[in-house]
Structures are given as structure tokens and as C-alpha cells.
Amino acid sequence: MNYRIFRSQSIMTINDLAQIGSHNKRMKTERLERKTFNEMLNKSKSIVKQMFLFYNILI
């Protein structure tokens, strides 16, 4: 998909292109951080689930 569809102005200079690259890098970093956070959250949920199961077995 062409980036110009989403921009109101065309890419005229190298600086415009650099801004697009820095935006893409920032978005990639945010996705990676979100993925890492979700993995930690899933692990925590799994541990809590195991604790509840273990506790219910003891009762």
C-alpha cells in the first residue's frame, strides 16, 4: 500500500522520507513492547490459574 494515501502532503524532500522512517521505527518498538507486556501478562495469568487449581485440590 502506498504511504501517500495516508498523507495529506506529498513526499518532497529527504527529510520527509526520514520522518516516515522514524515513525515506522517508533511503531515497531511500540508493537514489540506491547508483545512483551502481553507475554508477561499471560505468564502471570497462567501462574495464578495454577495456584487456584492447586489450592482447590488441597481443599
Image (cartoon, helix red, strand yellow):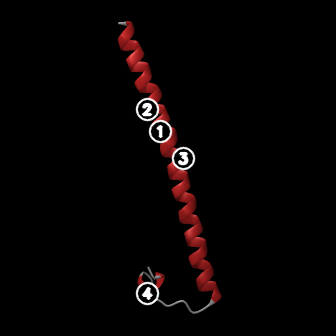
Decide which of tag 1 and tag 4 comes sooner along the chain: 4
- CB-based contact (under 8 Å), mark 3 and mark 4: no
Q: Nearer the viewer, mark 4 or mark 2?
A: 2
Gap in Å between the C-alphas at discs 3 and 2?
14 Å
Decide which of tag 3 and tag 2 comes sooner along the chain: 3
Q: Position of residue 31 (x, y in %)?
A: 51, 57
Q: Position of residue 9 (x, y in %)?
A: 47, 89
Q: Which mark is residue 41?
A: 1
Amino acid type at mark 1: Leu
Gap in Å between the C-alphas at discs 4 and 2?
44 Å
Q: Which residue is mark 2?
A: 45
Q: Quadrant of the N terminus?
A: bottom left
Q: Does residue 49 sit above or below 20 in this rendering?
A: above
Decide which of tag 4 and tag 2 comes sooner along the chain: 4
Q: Which residue is mark 3?
A: 36
Gap in Å between the C-alphas at discs 3 and 4?
34 Å
Q: Quadrant of the C terminus?
A: top left
Q: Determine crowd level at label 1: few under 14, some 14-19, many 20+ residues with C-alpha closer than 10 A.
A: few
Q: Nearer the viewer, mark 3 or mark 4?
A: 3
Gap in Å between the C-alphas at discs 2 and 1?
6 Å
Measuring 44% from the left and 30% from the top, which residue is drawn there? 46
Gap in Å between the C-alphas at discs 1 and 3?
9 Å
- CB-based contact (under 8 Å), mark 1 and mark 4: no
Gap in Å between the C-alphas at discs 1 and 4?
39 Å
In the image as oriented, which residue stretches furthest toward the bottom? 12
Q: Position of residue 48 (x, y in %)?
A: 44, 26
- CB-based contact (under 8 Å), mark 2 and mark 1: yes
